[in-house]
Image: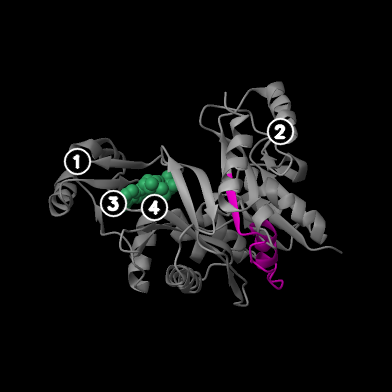
C-alpha cells in the first residue's frame, strides 16, 4: 500500500505537492476548507481546520499529517498528537511559526541574530521603544498576519492604538525598523530522524508587503554569507525541532550581517524556484521529510533561477487565453497556476525561468507580464 500523506488546507502549496506525490507514488489527501480550492484535485475531505472532530476523522485515514498553512489551532494539533497521529511539523515547533512573539523569544534563547524587539501592552510601552529606536518602528500582530497584513511602520504610539485595544491585554510585537540592503530567504529540510539539507540562500523582493520576485541563488552572495545563512537555518531547524521544510526569512544589512525576520514551516513562496531550478523541489522535499524518507539533492540545475509571482491576474476565461499566449511567446518559461479566482493583489500563479541570471529574469518577467490586468 502506498504511503498516505494528509495535508490540512487546500491552497496552492497543497496543490503543488500533488505532482511530486504522484511521481513518488504517495497517496496525497487534502482537507480543504471549501469546495473548489486550489488543491481540489486531491481534496478528499472538506472541513474546518479548527474543528477537532473533522480534523481527527481526516487524520485517521493517513500515515502523516502536514500543512498547507500554519493556522491549525494548538489544541487541535495536541489532540492529533494525543490520538497517536504523526504530525509534521509538530505543535511544539509550529507554535513558533504561529506566534511572532513566541518566535522572537525562542530565537533570542538560541542566540539567533534578529532585530531589536519588545512585547508591548500599551501606548506608553510602545512610545518608550520608539523613543529608544530613533522614533520609528515596526509593529506586528503576533498571530494571523500574512503578506504584510498585520505589519505597520509607525512613528507614534497612537498609530497602533487600534491593535493595542483589540488584543484583550495580550502584548503586540514591536521591532526596530531595519534599514536592510535586501531581503533573503534560506530554506532547509529536516527529517524527524535528523537529516537536514539546505538550499542556496535566495534574494526575495517584496512589493507592498507581498513577495513579487525571487532570485536563486541570491546574486552577489559571498561564500561566507551563504555559509552563515545555511548554518543559521540548520541551527533554527534543530533548535525548534522543525520537521519538513523550513523557510527562514532574513534581512541583509549593508555590512553583510543577517537578521531573522520570520519563519515558515512548510513550502514557501521563496522556494517556488526549486520546482524548475533544483534537482529536488521543495514540494517533493517536504513530502520526503514529513515521511522520514531520505532527502533529495537540493542543488541548483542551472546558474540561476528566477521566480516572478502572478498577482491579481485576469478573470476566468481570459486566464486560459493568457496562458496560451505566454507559453507560445516564452517556450522556456515554466508557468504555474493555482486555479484561483483572480482578485487584485492575490497570488494566482508564478513563472519560473532558469539559465543565466539576466536572461532568466527577462524571460520570467516577460512571461508574467502577460497576466497583468
Ligand atoms: P508577514 O507575516 O505579513 O509576511 P513580515 O513580518 O514578513 O510579515 O513582514 C512583511 C514585510 O515587512 C517584510 O518582508 C519586510 O519587507 C517588512 N518588514 C517586516 N519587519 C520589518 C522590520 N523590522 N524592519 C523593516 N522592515 C520590516
Magenta highlight range: 282-307
Left or right of 230? Residue 330 is: right
Residue annotated with mark 3: 179
- In whole angstroms, how far apart are the C-alphas of marks 2 and 1? 47 Å
- Nearer-N-terminus badge (3/2): 3
- The residue carrying mark 2 is 329
Mark 2 against mark 4, which lies toward the viewer? 2
Between the C-alphas of marks 1 and 3, the distance is 15 Å
Label 3 – label 2 distance at C-alpha: 39 Å
Q: Using the image, tell me which numbered label, if any, was put on residue 182.
A: 4
* Depth order, front residue of 244/254: 254
x 60%, y 46%: residue: 359
Q: Quadrant of residue 312?
A: top right
Q: Earlier in the sequence, mark 2 or mark 1?
A: 1
Q: What is the x, y in percent for residue 79? A: 58, 59
Picture coordinates of residue 34, whole percent (x, y): 66, 36
In this orientation, which residue lies closer to the viewer: 130 or 2?
Answer: 130
Amino acid at each position: 500500500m502506498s504511503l498516505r500523506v494528509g495535508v490540512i488546507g487546500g491552497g496552492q502549496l497543497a496543490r503543488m505537492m500533488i505532482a511530486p506525490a504522484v511521481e513518488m507514488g504517495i497517496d496525497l489527501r487534502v482537507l480543504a476548507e471549501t469546495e473548489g480550492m486550489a488543491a481540489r484535485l486531491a481534496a478528499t475531505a472538506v472541513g474546518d481546520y479548527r474543528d477537532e472532530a473533522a480534523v481527527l476523522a481526516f487524520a485517521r485515514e493517513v500515515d502523516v499529517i502536514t500543512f498547507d498553512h500554519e493556522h491549525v489551532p494548538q489544541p487541535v494539533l495536541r489532540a492529533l498528537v494525543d490520538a497517536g497521529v504523526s504530525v509534521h511539523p509538530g505543535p511544539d515547533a509550529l507554535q513558533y511559526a504561529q506566534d511572532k512573539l513566541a518566535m522572537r523569544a525562542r530565537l533570542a534563547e538560541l542566540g539567533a541574530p534578529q532585530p531589536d524587539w519588545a512585547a508591548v501592552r500599551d501606548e506608553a510601552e510602545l512610545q518608550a521603544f520608539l523613543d529608544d529606536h530613533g522614533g520609528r518602528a515596526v509593529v506586528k500582530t503576533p498571530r494571523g498576519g500574512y503578506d504584510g497584513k498585520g505589519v505597520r511602520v509607525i512613528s507614534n504610539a497612537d498609530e497602533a492604538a487600534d491593535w493595542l485595544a483589540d488584543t484583550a491585554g495580550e502584548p503586540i510585537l514591536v521591532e526596530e525598523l531595519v534599514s536592510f540592503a535586501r531581503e533573503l530567504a534560506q530554506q532547509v529540510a529536516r527529517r524527524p530522524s535528523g537529516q537536514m539539507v539546505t538550499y542556496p540562500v535566495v534574494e526575495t523582493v517584496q512589493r507592498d508587503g507581498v513577495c513579487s520576485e525571487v532570485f536563486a541563488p541570491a546574486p552577489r552572495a559571498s561564500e561566507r554569507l551563504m555559509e552563515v545563512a545555511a548554518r543559521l537555518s540548520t541551527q533554527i531547524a534543530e533548535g525548534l525541532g522543525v520537521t519538513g521544510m523550513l523557510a527562514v526569512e532574513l534581512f541583509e544589512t549593508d555590512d553583510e550581517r543577517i537578521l531573522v525576520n520570520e519563519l515558515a514551516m512548510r513550502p514557501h513562496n521563496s522556494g517556488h524556484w526549486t520546482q524548475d531550478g533544483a534537482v529536488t523541489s521543495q514540494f517533493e522535499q517536504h513530502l520526503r521529510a514529513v515521511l522520514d524518507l531520505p532527502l533529495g539533492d537540493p542543488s541548483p540545475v542551472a546558474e540561476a533561477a528566477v521566480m516572478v509571482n502572478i498577482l491579481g491576474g485576469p478573470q476566468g476565461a481570459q486566464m486560459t487565453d493568457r496562458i496560451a499566449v505566454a507559453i507560445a511567446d516564452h517556450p522556456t518559461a515554466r508557468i504555474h497556476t493555482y486555479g484561483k479566482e483572480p482578485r487584485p493583489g492575490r497570488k494566482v500563479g508564478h513563472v519560473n525561468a532558469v539559465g543565466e541570471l539576466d536572461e532568466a529574469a527577462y524571460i520570467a518577467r516577460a512571461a508574467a507580464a502577460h497576466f497583468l490586468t
